[in-house]
Amino acid sequence: MAFIHRTTMKPTKLELLSEWLPKQSWYVGEAAPELVKAGGFRLDDPEGEVGIEFLVVADTAAREPVAYQVPMAYRGAALEGAPGAALIGTSEHGVLGARWIYDGVRDPVLMAQLSALLRGEAMPQQQSISDTPDPTVTVHGTGPDDGFDVHVNRVLRPSEDAHPSFARVVAGWTWPDGTAARGVFAAATPR
C-alpha cells in the first residue's frame, strides 16, 4: 500500500500544472490558469514503485471555473521510452528526493491499474490518507477481462452518465465555492 508523506514538493504539483496544462490540446482556458486543488483519489502500484494519483484541479481564471482531471504517475527515475510530452515535470520531494511526474495516460503502470479498477480488481484509495480505501469512488458496471479501451475525461462535468461503455469510474470534487460535484473520471469502451 502507498504511504502518503506529509512533506514538501518543490515545485509543487499546482506550480507544475500551471505551466503544463495550457499546453494541452484539451485545455479550454483562454489565459494562464489559476489552479486550486479540488479533489481526487489514488490507486496502488502492486510493485510499490510508482505513485498513482488522479488529481482534480479547478481553474478559477475563467468566468466559470473549469475542473480538470490530471492522472499523475510519480517515479523515482525517468520513464524509459516515454515521449517528452508525457513528462509534466520534475520535483524535489522532501522525503523521497527527485520525482519524475508523468501524465498518467502515458504511463503504463497507471493505465494498467486504472484498467484493473474498471474490472473490479483494484481498490481506490483516499488521496491524502495512507492505506485507506475511498468509498466515494465507485465503478458502475464491470469492464471485460480484455478487449476494451480506457477513456479518461480530462475536463470534468457533473454527470454520472457516460457514452456506451462496459464500466465507468465515478468520483467527486469540490468547486471553489464549496459546491460538491460528481462525474465520470474514466470509462471502458468497446474496441
Image (tube, rainbow, N blue to C red):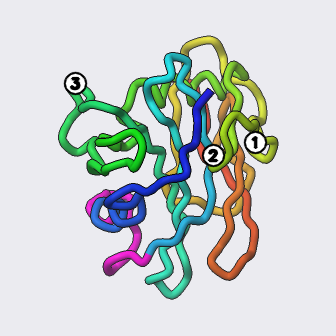
**Label 3 vs 1, first from the N-terminus:** 3
54 vs 114: above or below: below
Residue 178 forms part of the magenta stretch: no
The amino acid sitting under disc 1 is: Asp
Q: What residue appears at the point 31 percent right and 57 percent down from the top-left corner? A: 24
Q: Which residue is mark 1?
A: 134
Q: Which residue is mark 2?
A: 41
Residue 24 forms part of the magenta stretch: yes
> In the picture, residue 32 is in which quadrant?
bottom left
Q: Residue furthest front?
A: 95
Q: Would residue 177 appear left or right of 36 to someone viewing this image?
A: right
The amino acid sitting under disc 2 is: Phe
Whole-number angstrom distance, CA of label 3 to CA of label 2: 26 Å
- The residue carrying pointer 3 sits among few (fewer than 14), some (14 to 19) or many (20 or more) residues within 10 Å by Cα, namely few
Residue numbers of the magenta segment = 22-34
> Can the viewer see residue 34?
yes
124 vs 63: above or below: above
Q: Which residue is mark 3?
A: 80
Q: What is the chief secondary structure element of the magenta stretch?
A: loop
Whole-number angstrom distance, CA of label 3 to CA of label 1: 31 Å
Determine contact: label 2, label 1, CB under 8 Å: yes
